[in-house]
Amino acid sequence: MIVIPAARPDIGVDEQAAVARVLESGMLAQGPEVAAFEQEFSSQVVGGRHAVAVNSGTSALHLSLLACGIGPGDEVIVPSFTFAATANSVALTGATPVFVDIEPNHFCIDPAAVEAAIGPRTRAVMPVHLYGHPAALGRLKGICERRGLLLIEDAAQAHAASVDEIPVGAWGVAASFSFYPTKNMTTGEGGIVTTPDAGIARTLRLLRNQGQERRYENEIVGLNNRMSDVHASIGRVQLGRLPLFTRRRQENAAFYDANLSGVVTPPVAVGAVHVYHQYTIRVVGLDRDAFAEQLAEQGVGSGVYYPIPTHRLPAFANDQDLPETDRAAKECLSLPIYPNLTNDERERVAAAVNVAAAAGS
């Protein structure tokens, strides 16, 4: 039996040729490919905002917070139902992540919970556009403006998503994207920060390069978080393919919406464009892990993102009661949705889900 994996990067001959071109040039680090990738991402994804490429999505989150002045004594409100990098990046600045619950439909941070969690040390709110569905950015931006807080987006999973025709990454004072191999587009490994503020953009460029703009003239304490030209060259090709990737993910999602039964399929908010980094169902009234095992027995891979809420991880050891977060962690299961999923494969996925749901009902 040929197994359909939960994720499958789409790297082709054009990406290979781009890498070969860079290797032949001899200019491998922080050269013209990085600059071109930043400009192209800016114009094609975030409406012309400054874009600063770095070596990972986690670095993008970390540097975005540092560049915005987040540090010891500050609190940043974050969702718990997400990858640990969101809260880790806050903690690494010396600030404190304040965990709040998600809303049940789209798995994103609950604006009402955000407002209730604001205290005297709150400096910023960091929503995560989880699984490719944008958070409620209109409401969150309004809260931040009323309360004098920074809106810093974690857009790691949401390249080309939008709310009311405004792209994610173009709402806050800064936003971070990831280019990990299984993301909606990849550079092999990498990330990028977008911002409307030229001063923040310059600080980001200093932070990623040991605090220097000119060699040996270190202006601030910085890190080595640079993106290489090899990675940027892959990203430039992938960026050109992003519209096709997005359309194919949305077509696969529409097929699942129409053909799955016995599970809760992911709704899309009014005004939102979902780009389906993951197609995440809820397995309700059944054992989710046993359900996943049944899919595996039929040759269908799946993923559980995220089985342990961040606030319950040993790194944070927080016993807060976040009921929607805990419920999502027990019920959520992500199905193959990548753009190179074939029509036959997605039919196999749908059939396997329906069989597993019927067997457990």
Image: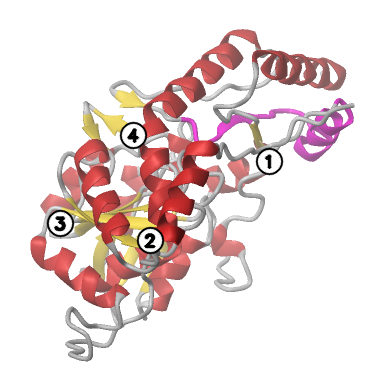
- Which residue is at a point 18% across and 52% down the rendered structure image? 144
Secondary structure of residue under mark 1 = loop
Q: Circle 3 is placed at which residue position?
A: 147
* Residue at mark 4: 160
**Picture quadrant where residue 171 is located:** top left
Q: Secondary structure at mark 2?
A: helix
Quick one: label 3 or label 1, which is nearer the N terminus?
3
Amino acid type assigned to the residue bearing label 4 in the image: Ala
In the picture, the quarter occupied by the N terminus is top right
In the rendered image, which quarter contains the C terminus?
A: top right
Calculate the distance from the C-alpha at mark 3 to the C-alpha at mark 1: 38 Å
- Is residue 284 within the magenta segment? yes
Local secondary structure at mark 3: helix
Q: Residues within 10 Å of mark 4 (few under 14, many from 20)?
A: many
In this view, the mark in front (2 or 4): 2
Q: Which mark is residue 303?
A: 1
Closer to us: 72 or 4: 4
Q: Is residue 135 above or below residue 147?
A: above
Mark 3 Cα within 10 Å, few/some/many (few <14, many 20+)?
A: some
Name the residue located 43 percent from the left edge and 27 percent from the top edge.
246
**Residue for point 86% across, 30% down:** 294
Instruction: Determine whether label 1 and label 4 are within 8 Å by CB.
Output: no
Q: Earlier in the sequence, mark 1 or mark 4?
A: 4
Instruction: Nearest to the eye among marks 1 and 4: give it.
Output: 4
Classify 256 as above or below 187: above
Query: Looking at the image, is mark 3 or mark 4 earlier in the sequence?
Result: 3
- 168 vs 9, nearest the viewer: 9
Q: Nearer the viewer, mark 3 or mark 2?
A: 2
Q: Position of residue 284 (x, y in %)?
A: 69, 28
Instruction: Say whether residue 42 is left or right of residue 63.
Output: left
Residue 225 appears in view:
yes
